[in-house]
Image (tube, rainbow, N blue to C red):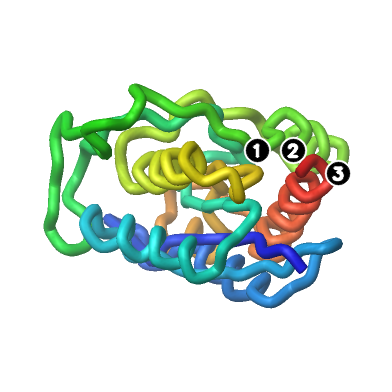
Amino acid sequence: MQKLLLTGFEPFLSNPLNPTMDIVKALDGKILGNYAIVGRVLAVDFKQAPRQFLTLIEEVQPAIIVSLGLAAGSTRISPERVAINVKDGEKDNSGNAFHDAPIHEDGDVAYFSTLPIRQIVNRLNEAGYPAAISNSAGTYLCNNIMYEGLYYAKFHSSIKRAGFIHIPASFELAIQNGRIAGWPQKDLQAAIELALTECILND
């Protein structure tokens, strides 16, 4: 049986919780087709997260890598089209901050997702879940991890597909925030399961 590595993040910045954590924990060990999902949570730390991520890839030996991130304020599931070779933004959970720094000195300027992002969006919209392709993963940890996965895949043919999907806030987070839209956690999870199914069908 092949492996699908699914990662999420811990809470960060002004967000007291992160719905990606619940999704990866709930789907850890689930079987989809000929794939076993391995769900893990990464630190929101520019120094720790890439090391955690690469260690997981080496240990799990996945054929598909899908990373999740929270886009608080968004109303749609958003598969990311591209990751850029830049880390920049606010301080992470350990107080680290980078400005205009490359992720890999020897890396390409950008890498395109190898997930079937158009099929994912179409599948979700057909199922009644608002979804659209995003053309920017930003420059914070989400972009960093997406870039790391695609950089690794460039040199390892065992990785069939890799990419990143942003999700909206859960109702619980939206209520605590008071100013953003939210989805029921069960719908966020169901939408991601559909997205993963599409990745497997198109491997």
Task: Determine which quarter of the picture holds residue 124.
Answer: top right
* Secondary structure category for the residue under label 2: helix
Are dots 2 and 3 in contact, CB under 8 Å? no
Q: Quadrant of residue 129?
A: top right
Which amino acid lies under the numbered mark 2 shown in the image of this protein?
Ile
> Mark 3 belongs to which amino acid?
Ala
CA–CA distance in space, label 2 to label 1: 8 Å
Q: Are marks 2 and 1 in contact (CB under 8 Å)?
A: yes
Name the residue rendered at 17%, 34% in the picture.
101
Residue 120: image tag: 2
Q: Tell me the kind of residue under disc 1.
A: Leu
> Is residue 129 shown above or below 172?
above
Which residue is label 1 attached to? 115
Residue 150 % position (x, y): 48, 40
Task: Looking at the image, tell me whether mark 2 or mark 3 is earlier in sequence order.
Answer: 2
Q: Quick check: 73 left or right of 1?
A: left
Secondary structure, mark 1, is: loop
User: Who's the residue at 55% across and 42% down the image?
Assistant: 163
Between the C-alphas of marks 2 and 3, the distance is: 11 Å
- Camera-nearest residue between 112 and 126: 112
Q: Which mark is residue 187?
A: none
Q: Looking at the image, is 18 positioned above or below residue 191?
A: below
Separation of residues labelled 3 and 1 (CA atoms)? 19 Å
At which x and y percent is residue 91? 17, 50
The secondary structure type at the circle numbered 3 is loop
Q: Nearer the viewer, mark 3 or mark 1?
A: 1
**Which residue matches tag 3?**
127
